[in-house]
Image (cartoon, rainbow, N blue to C red):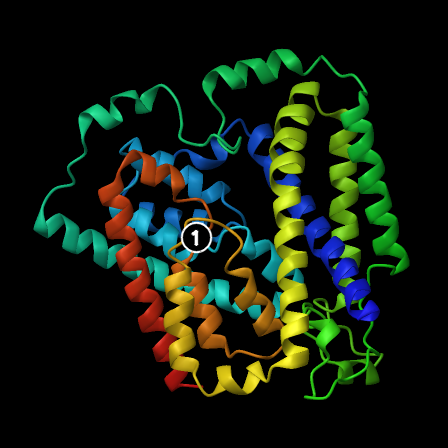
């Protein structure tokens, strides 16, 4: 039990650290581009659909918030909105990249193709049935502000604020705390202290329970036998990559303005996302670890793949990051097949659709319905070929 808890704590710190570093990188990109990263994409409906799918493919909810904003501004079509929701898998995309990078990249590519195809079909059907009707009372103020209250999109006033705040740089305690924490994380990655214990014992039912996410870099223990083979998605190379990204974030942290550090990095990522990500990660890993020690869940799930696809799709309706993590962890542990993870990833989109629910409940309901139908179809189709 002590070994299980130690491994879960180490894995939780590793995964949370990787997620936070990627969030900080994307946040910096968006702020430095002054939001231009999301503009100039309204040429054709097909182009909008492809742009929506691309934005949905961005790990996290930033692309989702941007798409909802562009949709409510009447700059994106409904098909583009649907494409985003299919391609997006919320904050869990970060975790999948950390835990199962090779499978995650394949799945993201499959989801992108499905998203573009369904988005184009949706626009064709939508335009034939009726022209898109928006409640002017709901959208008259769209030109004034954006929907993202999490700091991903830049308000024009905030843009000006950021410009004036660039010269204001003070090394207060928040910046120092993040700097020290990031430096320790880089050191732990470089020295291998956050690596996984691949020699953990195998329990009664044949699982390495304390390594629920030990497969998160997509290599098996047998892969260590060929030390000359270079796998750029192996654990060692991924640690080097994320250590490099962390160093970049460390430099950004040194030279960024007080406004960016406090509002975007501290208040948005550290205070809001970091505790949630860590709690969900540690909680799910603990539940899965204990469950696999006492219940032959692998046999039950393997024999009920069709039911698991339905369950994963229904859970994906929840407009919040977190519940999907259990399917990511089970897949990384080799407990559930790919079709279940695919259905779950298509169905859920983190909390990116929450602003849409506030702006247009009808659009949210219809888009989610299409999302779930596509998730079920893709999951069951994949099950036939596996």
Instruction: Please tell me how crowded label 1 is: few (under 14), some (14-19), or many (20+) other residues with Cα within 10 Å.
Output: many
Residue 192, image quadrant: bottom right
Q: Position of residue 329 (x, y in %)?
A: 60, 68
Is 177 on the left or on the right of 299, as rendered? right
In the depicted view, which residue is nearer to us: 185 or 223? 185
**Is residue 45 at least partly visible in the picture?**
no
Q: Quadrant of the N terminus?
A: bottom right
Task: Classify mark 1: helix, strand or loop.
Answer: loop
Most extreme residue toward the left, as rendered?
A: 129
**Is residue 260 at least partly visible in the picture?**
yes
Most extreme residue toward the right, as rendered?
A: 191
At 27% from the left and 57% from the top, the residue drawn is 369
Is 259 on the left or on the right of 307, as rendered? right
At 50% from the left and 85% from the top, the residue drawn is 300
Q: Quadrant of the C terminus?
A: bottom left
Q: Position of residue 296 (x, y in %)?
A: 59, 85
In the picture of the structure, the residue carrying the numbered disc 1 is: 349
Q: Position of residue 239 (x, y in %)?
A: 78, 58
């Amino acid at each position: 039990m002590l070994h299980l808890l130690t491994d879960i704590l180490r894995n939780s710190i590793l995964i949370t650290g990787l997620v936070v570093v990627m969030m900080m990188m994307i946040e910096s990109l968006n702020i430095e581009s002054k939001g231009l990263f999301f503009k100039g994409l309204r040429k054709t409906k097909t182009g909008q659909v492809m742009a929506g799918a691309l934005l949905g493919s961005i790990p996290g909810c930033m692309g989702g918030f941007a798409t909802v904003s562009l949709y409510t501004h009447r700059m994106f079509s409904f098909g583009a909105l649907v494409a985003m929701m299919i391609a997006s898998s919320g904050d869990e995309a970060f975790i999948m990249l950390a835990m199962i990078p090779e499978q995650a990249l394949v799945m993201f590519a499959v989801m992108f193709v499905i998203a573009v195809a369904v988005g184009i079909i949706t626009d064709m059907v939508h335009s034939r049935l009726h022209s898109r009707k928006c409640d002017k009372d709901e959208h008259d103020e769209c030109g004034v502000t954006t929907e993202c209250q999490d700091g991903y999109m830049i308000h024009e006033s905030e843009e000006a604020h950021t410009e004036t705040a660039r010269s204001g740089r003070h090394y207060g305690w928040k910046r120092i705390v993040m700097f020290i924490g990031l430096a320790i994380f880089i050191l732990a990655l470089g020295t291998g202290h956050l690596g996984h214990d691949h020699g953990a014992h195998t329990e009664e039912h044949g699982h390495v329970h304390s390594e629920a996410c030990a497969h998160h870099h997509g290599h098996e223990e047998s892969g260590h036998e060929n030390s000359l083979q270079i796998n750029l998605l192996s654990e060692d190379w991924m640690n080097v990559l994320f250590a490099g990204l962390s160093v970049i974030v460390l430099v950004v942290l040194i030279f960024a303005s007080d406004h960016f550090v406090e509002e975007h990095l501290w208040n948005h990522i550290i205070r809001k996302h970091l505790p949630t990500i860590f709690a969900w990660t540690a909680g799910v890993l603990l539940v899965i670890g204990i469950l696999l020690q006492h219940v032959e869940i692998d046999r039950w799930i393997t024999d009920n793949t069709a039911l698991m696809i339905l369950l994963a799709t229904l859970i994906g309706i929840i407009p919040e990051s977190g519940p999907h993590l259990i399917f990511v962890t089970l897949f990384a542990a080799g407990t559930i097949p790919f079709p279940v993870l695919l259905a779950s990833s298509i169905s859920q989109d983190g909390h990116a659709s929450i602003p849409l629910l506030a702006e247009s409940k009808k659009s949210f309901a219809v888009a989610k319905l299409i999302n779930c139908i596509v998730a079920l179809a893709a999951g069951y189709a994949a099950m036939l070929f596996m």
